[in-house]
Each structure stands twice: as C-alpha cells, then as structure tokens.
C-alpha cells in the first residue's frame, strides 16, 4: 500500500492532532497573548483579585496572630506534633511539581504540546513553593530565628544537624525555588524582549521595566545557541529535582519509625502524588484561563485531555502505592503497622481515609471515559476531588499515624483550630492572588516557545522535520 | 504569512545614537525587483551592520550559504525563536556551557560533601540518633541538591552574563527599526564588519547580496556614537549609588540586629510571666515571690529521725556498711566538723577548748563507749548541752559515716592484743 | 543473516551443551540449595529482561511515540524470551520448598511467618506464578504477535488496539513485577520487607531491557540491518538509559538510606549481610557499575548517540543487572559471594539457551515494524 493510501485509511483515533486550532502565526500569537499585559483587565479580574486578596489578608492576620501569640493557637499537641503546618507544606510543594514536570520533563521528552502551557505551569510552581515555604517558616514558632537553619559560622559555635531530613528539606526547597525561578525567568527573557519591542515609548515605566528585565535580548543566533543549551541543561537539572525534592520531603516521614511512616515506597509514592495533585490544579487553572482570556485556540482541548490522561495515570500509580501500603501492613505481621492501617479505614479518622481513597483512586477512574476527559464539568469535578483528596492524604498520613502510635497512654484525638483553617484558606488566597497578578502582568503563554513549534516554523531544508 | 509588508517603523524607536543620515528604506515588492539605494560607491561610512529581513526560516536558511560564500563580513542572525540548524549554518561554535555546568556541578557535589563532613565530623562531632558523625548516607540528599544548585546557577548566569554578555542595552540592533519585527515574526540576517576596523563594511555590496537572496527589506544600522564613559554625570551617579547602598546596608543591618530584636514578639521570651528569684508576686499575701518552705518541709537527704528522745534513738541501726569508703567519708566529715572540739582522736582535746572554756565530751570514755550508734547519731542531729545540732551540716549518710568513724577511733584507742593480726 | 551470525550457532550450541552438562552434574553432586538458587536466579534474569522489553513496547504505544517505531521490533523480539521463561518458572517452583523459609514447615512456629504461611506456601505461590505467566503470555500475544502480523496486513487497526491495550497492560505489569519481586526474591528472607521492592525490580528490568535493546540495535546496524536508524534514535536510547540509571540509583539509595536511618533490626539484617565480608565488595562494585560508570559515560550529548559508546555501556549495564540480581539473591546461601563451576555451568546453559532463542527470534518479522502507519515519521525523527 502506498504511503498516502496508508494515511488515508487511518482511523480517526490515530490521526495526529494539531496543537493549535485555527490559523495561528507568530504575529497573531503575539497580538493575542502579549496584548494582555498592555490593556486593562476585565472587571471580573478585579473582583476575583479582591476575593483572593481578602482571603490572603485574613490568612495573614492569622499568621501574625500565631507569631505574636505562639504555636499554641494551633491544634498541634502531643502526640500530633505535626498537623496542618506540615500537611499544608507538603500539599503546596506537591502542587508545584506539576509545573516542573511540564516545563522540564516534557521538554526532555520533546512533547511539543507542553509549549503552550509550560509558562503558566512553571509560574504556578513558583507560587506554590512560596505558599509552601510559609509553613516551615511559621511552624518553628520563632520565625525570625529561622536563619539558624543555614550553616553559617556563628558565635554560638553550633551548626545545624546534617543528619536530619528536616535540614535536607531546607536545602531541597531552597534549591527547588531557585532553580524554578531561574528556569522560569530564562524562559521569560525572549518574551519580555517582545513586550519591550511592542511597548510604545510613551509608556516610560513599562518600557523601562521590560527593557531591564529582558536584559537587552536581541534574538541573536549566537545567543540562541547558548540559550538553548542552558535551557536544555536546566530542564535536565529540573527533572532531577522533580524526583528529588518530594523524595526529600517524604524522607521527613520515612526516616522515622512512626508506624505507617517508615515505608520505603514513600519517595516515589510522594513524587507521584505531587505530580497528581499538581496536574489537577493546573487543569483547573488552565480551564479558567483559556475561557476568560479566550485562549482556546492555544490551550486546546487536546492539551486538557492529555493532562487528564496524566492525572489518570498518576491516580493508578497512587492506587498501586495505597495497595502496597495496605498489603505490606498485613505482610509485615507487625501489630503496630497493622493498627496504624486499621486507623486509616476505621477509627476516629476513618472517614478521612475513605475520603482520600475515594477522591484519589475512585473518582479519577472516570477519566477512562473520553467524555469525562473532555468535558469541563467532569474535569473540574475530578480535579477538585483530586485536590481535596490529596490534601486529605497528607492529613491521613500525618494525623492518623501520629495520633495513635506505640504508646497507648499517649493516644489523643487531634482537633484543628480556627487559626489552622484560617491559614490554610489564606494560603489558597495567596496562591490565586499571585496567579491573578501573573496573568495580568506577564505573558501567560510562552509565545517564543509556541512560535517555534507552529507549522512551518522550522526550516524543512536539511531534513529537520518534526516527528 | 499575514504580514507581507516590511515592518512598520515605529517613529518613536528612532535610535538615540548617531544622527541618522536619511536613507530611503528599500521597499521590495513581491516580485523581487529592487531599487537602487545608495548613491555613493561604497555606501555609508558609519554603518555598524546591515540587516536583511526574511519572511520565514526557509528563506533565511537558503540565504545564508550564498551570503556566507561572498565573505562580506561577520554573519549573525536575529530571530524571534531558536531555529534548528541556524547556528551550524552560520558557523557558530558549539556552546561550552555543558562542560562548564559539569565542572561546577561536580564542584558543588564536592563542596557539599566537604562542608558537611567538616561540620559534622570534625568541627563539632556529635552522635545524633545513633548515627556516627561521619554518616555519608545522610549527606547525599544535600549533596545532590547543592550539585543541582551550582549547576543551575552556572547554566543560567553563565549563559546570560558570561557567554551572552547580557544584560547589555547598547547594541545598535536594539534601536533599529527592524527590532520589533525581529521579536515578532521576521528573521534577520546581519552582516557586520569583521575585525577592528569598522569602516571595512561595504554596505553597497552587502545590500546587493542580501537583495539577491530575497530579503524583503534591508536596513543599515549605524554605529553608535562613541560616548565618554566617565562623564560628570556618571561619576556623580556612581558615587550617589555607592553612598545610597552604604546607607541602605547600614540601616538594614542596624534594623536587623539592634532594632528588630527589641520589638514584640521577639522580646516575648525575655519578659516572662513566670516567677523568678527576687520578683514580686501578688499571689502571696506578703507580696514576695520568694517564700520560705511550708512548715514541715523536709529537704532531700534530710529525712526525720523517727525517734523523739535519745533513748528511743538508741534502737536505730547504722544503715551504712562498715567498709573503707564509709570510714573514709566518716573521717573526712569528722575532721571537718567534730575534730575541732572533740579532737582528732575524739578524746576531747580539740583546738578550741582553751579559747572557749568549754569541755567537749571525751568520746573515748567508758560512757561513750557504751553508747549505741543511734545515741551518737541522736546527738549529732539534736546536739547536747553546749554542742549544737549538726543536722544541717551533715546529711544522714554522712552522720552515720561519722558514727562509724567514732567507733573506729574508740576501738583504736582501746585496742586489745587479739586485734593485731598474728 | 550475516556471516558472523551464521557461525554462532555452533558456538552457542556448544556453550549450551557444556552448560547443560554442568547443570545436570550440579543437581546430582551439589547441595540442592545451590542448584535451585542458580535456577531461580536465571529465571529472574530472563523474566526481568523479557517483561522489561514488553514494557518498552507497551510504553511506546501508551504515549503514541513515533521516534521509537523504527526500533520497536527489537524489544518485541526480546520480549519473546517470556516464552522459554514459562518452563523455567514452572520447574523453578520445585525450589520453593527448598529455598523459601515461608514455605517450609518451620515457618509455622516463627511468630512473624506463622500468620502468612498460607500466602507464602507452595500452593498460593504457584498460583501467583501461573497467573503472572498467563498474563505475560497473553500480553505478549496482543502486543508482539499483533505487531508481527501487522507487517503483512498493514492494518492500522492493530495500532489502535495496541494503544487501547497499553494502559491496561501497565496496570497489570505493575503487579507482575511486584509479585515476582516479592515472591521470588524478597521471599527468600520473608521476615524482611520493603514496599519499594517492586519498583526497584521494575527499574532494573526496564534498564536491562533498554540496555539489551540498545546493544541489539547497535549490533544490527553493524550487520547492515536497521540502516535507516539514525544517531538521533540512538541518542534517545542513550538518553533513556542515562535517565533511568539515575532512577534506579535513586530507588536503590532510597531503600538503603531509609533502612540505614531507622536502624530497625528486622530491616537492617538484610543489608548487614550485604555490607560485610565479601559482599561489601560486591555492593561497591554494583554501585560503580550500575551508577557511576553509566552516569559519567553517558552524560554528554555526543556520548549518548555514539554507537560504540552506547554498545559498551549497554554491555556494562547488562552485566550490572546480572550483578544486581546476584547481589539480591545469592546471599540466601549464607556464605560470601561465590562463583563456582555450578554458577559457570548455569551461566553457560542459560546464556546459551537465551542467545539461541534470540537468534531465532531476530528472524521473526521484519527488522522494523513495516506495517506501522507512522514508520515514516519515526524514521524522519531528528533531534
């Protein structure tokens, strides 16, 4: 059969899907995406910002109250010494991982569909890490002394304890934040140059800001050579971080001997969970963005469907992990571990265990059906379920294992306080405030990267086609 | 391509550099005919580079080898995104960034390990959680993260600052008319003068060559006007900047180290509401924080005797064993407390006797030889006649040890033949 | 078939025959423990290679990758090793009562094992093994036989079916590898457990299959087959090998570090045995061969697409995988690391059988899946 005839006979499902809908060329792309930073946002943006900002300010108020009065205003007490603080920390760090996976790992695999969403996803990573960083900073009780964590020569003649996973966490999160920021910023430089060149001279401040931030980028081929190399190297390095950062976070638990925490599967299980929660959050945000900013031709149905497939895959990995934990609880024949596991599906917090399993394993199975993968209602429903489920998963791991471990005389029920909830809600407020501000000020789609993958963007001469 | 005309020049991005000798921009219609541009033979003297704009990457890539073969100057391209194969076509060298990152990453790994090792195993070694000071397993996560950190900063900052020499806002292309097209959707090939002498650029030949390969518009970018660096303005600004930086740094340090720690809540642990020595307290009637212990309080090691008279005390049994340690203790305490009055041999010939005119008991006498241990103990605790109580000075064990020692002294002064070892 | 290949049957047959002799002798003369340890060792080697290769095939269908289409036939053929694995596994079941404490009568009196004897004992063990073999064989049929058939029919329907089958296969694959890891390897010390063990074996299987595939591609190219496969394709193979070397090391280190950190006696004894005496040397060599060497050898871009370097690293990786499984399994004998004529015979026999099988398998179907509708795009892939 001839090549053409072969292609003509292809079933629908095998036909390649275009990454942009309708006519898109570099000029129209710039006009569509780069116009936003220049114009006033719609009223709904202001309303949304007012809402998220008020949530954040409320949360900030509770944070100030905590610092001023003490950690006693939280629900943390023996034996549940870690509660909302660490749950929220792990939750937000996890959300950040999706951005890095999309930016870095999908780049390494040359998945071109990632170009349209990488900028936003990477920005979400940075905002998520900012939200995450609040919690370890606050939970020390005297946050102004948090610099003690860094190994600098001091007159107290004392160093931090390098054998503690909490210190590994400090380094891991700092590195993750720095690398994400660097990677995101480098990707922005050519786009900022575009913005600089589009900005009229009469907007002095804006032009100056774009000029300085774009660092005088002029698109020289000799510069692109180094730039592309740096981008590839950063993507490779960030790939390593996706695995390592959440693994180090999992070490906070797995290195201990608390029953239910000391499971060797924690590192990859946490990483999978992070990607899972992160992708769900990215889906929610992108649905809102593509609708409110009319970007459906760039953030296409295909993008959303593929991301939902990733969510499904991660849900299956989580299912495997939960199964292994449960099965190992039996296989170990260790009464403490078995007891901890029974507390997950029964006892005071059994409802949280079932909520976790339902939201993380059962509900995402809807994504086996194409209809659910491509429908806004089901997407948002599943994504919210996953977000809730993944928060509760950390709750299950931390609170359930801690509230009843080896010594029955130390068993106690944990009750969160209003301040705990207030700070959690405030962190969501902060995250979405930053997202809204980002969408207002910077290009939400990496126009430079999308231009490079448009049909006809690369020269056909020399056999440099695309797969 | 939607935009088939050459880019609309933005009059407000006119270069602030050299005064531009107006040159009619070449407007190349679609059929490729060109109009003559320059009237002079070699073209302009002050050209820095000549830009030829192309509509798409195929046109650019096709143009490069032809222009390159004419050897008119150094070739560079300006594109809105990275174009595959462009650098190779232009003969641009591979980037050394990979090797740089590898070296710095390795340095990061070594630094992290070395620092952790020195801190944990040499400078202040402590065993934590049963783990030896040199626990290499624990150092691996941080080593990995620091490796990535070093590598990342090398890749990012090395690329920007070192290799691309950015930020740099003075390149003439930035103020050219074509710049906004370059970052939007056009692809520019530029020919610069090679070598130090800028006058070597033959703009007419370059323009001709670019037109031949299908450039849709040509722009000659003039050289920037040489400006002196150390103007009065620059020096003033620099000094002002340094002064400002110093002031800000100083103020920040002061704020961080002196002012900030003295604000609440940082001071909360200094002013504590708990009761501390010398503090007053409204809890007690007399307003004093420090109070005497309640009546009947017994200090540790000073349990009551359980006997109310010396005769009752006679039944107390010495709980300490009669061994060398006890006798040593007894000797020490006796010498400290008792010998001054009762004498070193417990015979009543102490050193204070003559001065005070007192008559301490001669413990070698028969009366005291007949005393039981408990009776001696009673006297130590309660005193007798002129002898005060020594209960506060000796703990129970010490008192019993003294009793043993007194017994030993008594025996020593009344030794019998059979006490000597044959 | 080139001359080199035409010569090899004699060598291979000789090798296999010699090995078979040694194996038979060892059954008669040796302690049965050593015999069976070797047998199950080679079962795991062949199984991991086969299932890892099948994973590669399924992965390509799962993500609809195009670049790997030209070389997909290689892992498909490697995956057929799962067929000779069936008799090896079934015979290996005779090792269960000999080697696995959970299946021995003493287990009923051990307080840790007593509660799970019903799971560890031969009947359930065999049931799980049979299920694994059935599932693997069925998957082989769908993915590999379908692909071979597509060569002739050129029916795109297979590609559609394979893409639909792949996600389900991945779910099943996770459990296949986990079952084999827990039953055949970790079951040798049934009081010990590590729930990452399935992931660890997966990493090793995937890497060994990648290595075998890379090596095969390079060798085929040297024999003037797979001519259209470019360095760009090799780069991707090299890149995956590099990335998953890091992944395997991460899993291995995570398991070790967590057990070292908590220092629980019931976990640490497994490592204690492997970190003292002769086994300590093996551990160090394993870390060097399985991580350090491939990591530094493949770190540059040129290295990843250089066929010679790729082939050498692939060979080292296969050796490292063999060493990894040796390090996992052989300490059960309770001695230091040993390589006696028994091990040599088993190696000759199983390597011979494996290579003979593969020699046949590499004649099945075309060298590239010519029926795949996207083969052209796959060949046009450039970095």
Image (cartoon, coloured by chain):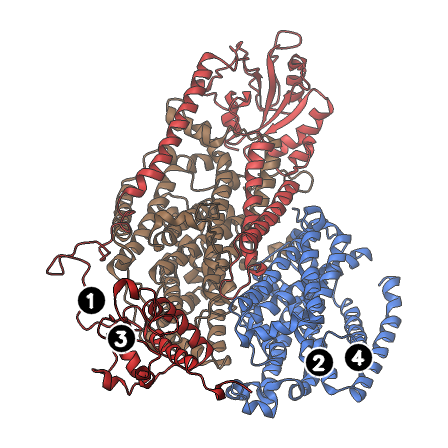
Q: Earlier in the sequence, mark 4 or mark 2?
A: 2
Q: Which residue is mark 2?
A: C37
Q: Which residue is mark 1?
A: B293
Residue appearing at x 63%, y 47% in the figure: B106
Q: Which residue is mark 3?
A: B381
Say above or below: C49 vs B212.
Answer: below
Whether discs 4 and 3 lie on one chain: the answer is: no
Q: Nearer the viewer, mark 3 or mark 1?
A: 3
Q: Which residue is mark 4?
A: C342
Front-most of residues A88 and C278: C278
Answer whether labels 4 and 2 touch (C-beta < 8 Å).
no
Answer whether labels 1 and 2 touch (C-beta < 8 Å).
no
Give percent across and percent down for residue B136.
59, 59
Where is the N terminus of chain C found, in terms of image quarters? bottom right
The subunit letter for the residue under badge 1 reads: B
Front-most of residues A141 and C113: A141
Q: Secondary structure at mark 2?
A: helix
Chain B: colour as depicted: red
Question: For the residues marked 4 and 2, what is the alpha-carbon distance in whole angstroms?
Answer: 10 Å
> Is C132 situated left or right of B248 in this image?
right
Chain A: colour as depicted: brown
The subunit letter for the residue under badge 2 reads: C
Say above or below: C306 vs C361.
Answer: above
> Is A385 situated left or right of C186 in this image?
left
Q: Nearer the viewer, mark 1 or mark 2?
A: 1
User: Label 1: few (<14), some or many (≥20) within 10 Å?
Assistant: few
User: Label 2: few (<14), some or many (≥20) within 10 Å?
Assistant: many
Chain C: colour as depicted: blue
């Amino acid at each position: 059969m001839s090549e053409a005839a072969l292609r003509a006979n292809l079933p629908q499902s095998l036909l390649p899907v275009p990454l942009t809908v309708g006519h898109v060329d570099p000029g129209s792309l710039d006009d569509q995406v780069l116009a936003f930073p220049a114009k006033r946002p719609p009223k709904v943006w202001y309303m949304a910002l007012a809402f998220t900002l008020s949530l954040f300010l409320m949360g900030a108020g509770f944070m100030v109250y905590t610092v001023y009065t003490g950690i006693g205003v939280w629900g943390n007490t023996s034996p549940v010494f870690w509660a909302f603080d660490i749950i929220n920390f792990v939750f937000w760090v996890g959300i950040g991982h999706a951005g890095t996976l999309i930016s870095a790992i999908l780049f390494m695999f040359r998945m071109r569909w990632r170009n349209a969403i990488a900028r936003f996803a990477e920005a979400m990573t940075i905002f998520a890490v900012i939200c995450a960083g609040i919690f370890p900073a606050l939970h020390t009780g005297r946050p102004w002394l948090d610099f003690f964590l860094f190994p600098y020569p001091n007159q107290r003649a004392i160093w931090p304890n390098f054998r503690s996973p909490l210190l590994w966490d400090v380094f891991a999160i700092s590195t993750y934040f720095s690398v994400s920021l660097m990677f995101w910023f480098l990707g922005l430089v050519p786009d900022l140059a575009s913005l600089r060149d589009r900005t009229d001279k009469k907007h002095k401040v804006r032009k100056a800001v774009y000029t300085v931030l774009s660092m005088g980028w002029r698109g020289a081929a000799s510069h692109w050579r180094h730039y592309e190399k740096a981008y590839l190297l950063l993507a490779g390095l960030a790939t390593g971080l996706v695995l390592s950062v959440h693994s180090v976070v999992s070490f906070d638990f797995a290195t201990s001997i608390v029953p239910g925490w000391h499971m060797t599967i924690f590192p990859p299980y946490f990483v999978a969970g992070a990607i899972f929660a992160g992708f769900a959050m990215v889906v929610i945000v992108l649905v809102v963005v593509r609708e409110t900013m009319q970007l459906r031709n760039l953030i296409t149905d295909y993008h959303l469907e593929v991301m939902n497939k990733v969510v499904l895959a991660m849900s299956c990995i989580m299912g495997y992990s939960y199964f292994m934990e449960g099965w190992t609880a039996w296989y170990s024949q260790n009464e403490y571990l078995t007891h901890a596991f029974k507390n997950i599906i029964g006892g005071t917090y059994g409802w949280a265990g079932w909520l976790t399993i339902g939201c993380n394993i059962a509900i995402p199975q809807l994504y086996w059906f194409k209809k659910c993968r491509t429908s806004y209602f089901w997407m948002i429903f599943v994504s919210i379920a996953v977000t809730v489920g993944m928060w509760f998963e950390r709750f299950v791991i931390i609170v359930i294992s801690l509230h009843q471990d080896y010594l029955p005389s130390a068993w106690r029920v944990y009750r969160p306080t209003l301040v705990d909830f207030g700070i959690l809600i405030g962190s969501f407020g902060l995250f979405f405030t930053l997202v809204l501000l980002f969408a207002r000020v910077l290009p939400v789609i990496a126009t430079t990267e999308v231009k490079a993958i448009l049909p006809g963007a690369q020269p056909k001469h020399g056999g440099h086609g695309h797969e | 391509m939607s935009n088939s005309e050459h880019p609309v020049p933005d009059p407000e991005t006119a270069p602030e550099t050299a005064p531009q000798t107006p040159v009619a921009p070449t407007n190349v219609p679609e059929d490729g005919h060109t109009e003559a541009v320059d009237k002079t033979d070699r073209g302009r003297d002050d050209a820095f580079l000549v830009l030829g704009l192309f509509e798409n990457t195929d046109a650019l890539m096709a143009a490069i080898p032809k222009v390159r073969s004419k050897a008119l100057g150094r070739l560079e391209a300006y594109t809105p995104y990275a174009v595959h194969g462009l650098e190779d076509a232009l003969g641009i060298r591979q980037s050394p960034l990979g090797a740089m990152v590898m070296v710095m990453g390795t340095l990061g790994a070594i630094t992290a390990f070395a620092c952790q090792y020195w801190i944990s195993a040499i400078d202040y070694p402590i065993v934590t959680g049963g783990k030896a000071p040199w626990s290499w397993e624990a150092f691996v996560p941080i080593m990995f993260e620091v490796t990535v950190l070093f590598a990342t900063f090398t890749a990012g900052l090395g690329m920007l600052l070192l290799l691309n020499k950015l930020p740099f806002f003075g390149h003439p292309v930035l103020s050219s008319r074509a710049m906004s097209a370059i970052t939007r959707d056009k692809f520019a090939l530029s020919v610069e003068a090679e070598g130090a002498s800028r006058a070597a650029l033959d703009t007419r030949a370059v323009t001709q060559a670019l037109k031949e390969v299908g450039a849709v518009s040509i722009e000659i970018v003039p050289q920037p006007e040489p400006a002196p660096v150390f103007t009065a303005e620059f020096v003033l600004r620099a000094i002002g900047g340094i002064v400002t930086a110093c002031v800000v740094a100083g103020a920040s340090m002061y704020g961080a180290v002196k002012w900030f720690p003295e604000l609440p809540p940082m001071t909360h642990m200094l002013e504590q509401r708990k009761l501390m020595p010398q503090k007053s307290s409204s809890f007690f009637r007399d307003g004093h924080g420090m109070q005497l212990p309640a009546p009947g309080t017994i200090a540790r090691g000073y349990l009551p005797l359980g006997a109310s008279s010396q005769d009752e005390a006679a039944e107390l049994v010495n709980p300490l064993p009669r061994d060398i340690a006890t006798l040593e203790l007894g000797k020490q305490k006796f010498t400290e407390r008792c010998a001054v009055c009762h004498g070193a041999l417990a015979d009543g010939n102490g050193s204070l006797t003559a001065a005070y005119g007192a008559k301490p008991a001669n413990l070698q006498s028969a009366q005291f030889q007949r005393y039981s241990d408990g009776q001696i103990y009673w006297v130590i605790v309660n005193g007798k006649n002129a002898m005060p109580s020594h209960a506060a000075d000796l703990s129970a064990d010490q008192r019993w040890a003294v009793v043993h020692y007194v017994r030993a002294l008594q025996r020593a002064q009344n030794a019998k033949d059979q006490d000597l070892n044959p | 078939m080139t001359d080199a290949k035409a010569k090899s049957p004699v060598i291979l047959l000789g090798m296999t025959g010699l090995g078979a002799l040694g194996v038979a002798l060892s059954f008669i003369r040796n302690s049965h423990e050593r015999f069976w340890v070797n047998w199950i060792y080679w079962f795991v080697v062949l199984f991991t290679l086969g299932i890892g290769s099948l994973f590669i095939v399924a992965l390509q269908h799962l993500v609809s990758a195009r670049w790997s289409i030209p070389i997909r036939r290689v892992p498909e053929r490697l995956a057929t090793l799962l067929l000779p694995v069936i008799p090896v596994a079934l015979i290996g079941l005779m090792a269960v009562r000999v080697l696995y404490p959970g299946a021995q009568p003493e287990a009923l009196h051990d307080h840790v094992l007593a509660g799970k004897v019903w799971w560890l004992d031969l009947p359930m063990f065999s049931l799980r093994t049979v299920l694994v073999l059935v599932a693997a064989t069925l998957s082989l049929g769908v993915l590999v036989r379908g692909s071979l058939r597509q060569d002739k029919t050129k029916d795109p329907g297979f590609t559609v079916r394979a893409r639909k089958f792949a996600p389900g296969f991945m779910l099943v694959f996770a459990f296949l590898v986990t079952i084999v890891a827990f039953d055949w390897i970790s079951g040798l010390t049934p009081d010990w457990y590590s729930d990452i063990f399935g992931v660890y074996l997966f990493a090793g299987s995937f890497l060994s299959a990648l290595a075998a595939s890379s090596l095969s591609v390079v060798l085929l190219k040297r024999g003037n087959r797979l001519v259209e496969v470019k360095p760009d394709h090799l780069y991707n193979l090299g890149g995956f090998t590099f990335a998953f070397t890091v992944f395997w090391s991460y899993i291995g280190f995570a398991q070790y570090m967590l057990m070292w950190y908590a220092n629980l006696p019931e976990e640490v004894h497994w490592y204690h045995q492997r970190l003292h005496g002769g086994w300590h040397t093996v551990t160090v060599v394993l870390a060097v061969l399985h991580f350090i060497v491939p990591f530094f050898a493949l770190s540059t871009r040129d290295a990843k697409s250089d066929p010679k370097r790729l082939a050498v690293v692939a060979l080292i990786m296969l050796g490292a995988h063999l060493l990894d499984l040796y390090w996992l399994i052989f300490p059960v004998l309770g001695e230091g690391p040993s390589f006696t004529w028994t091990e040599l015979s088993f190696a000759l026999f199983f390597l011979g059988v494996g290579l003979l099988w593969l020699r046949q398998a590499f004649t099945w179907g075309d060298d590239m899946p010519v029926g795949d509708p996207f083969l052209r795009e796959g060949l046009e892939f450039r970095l």
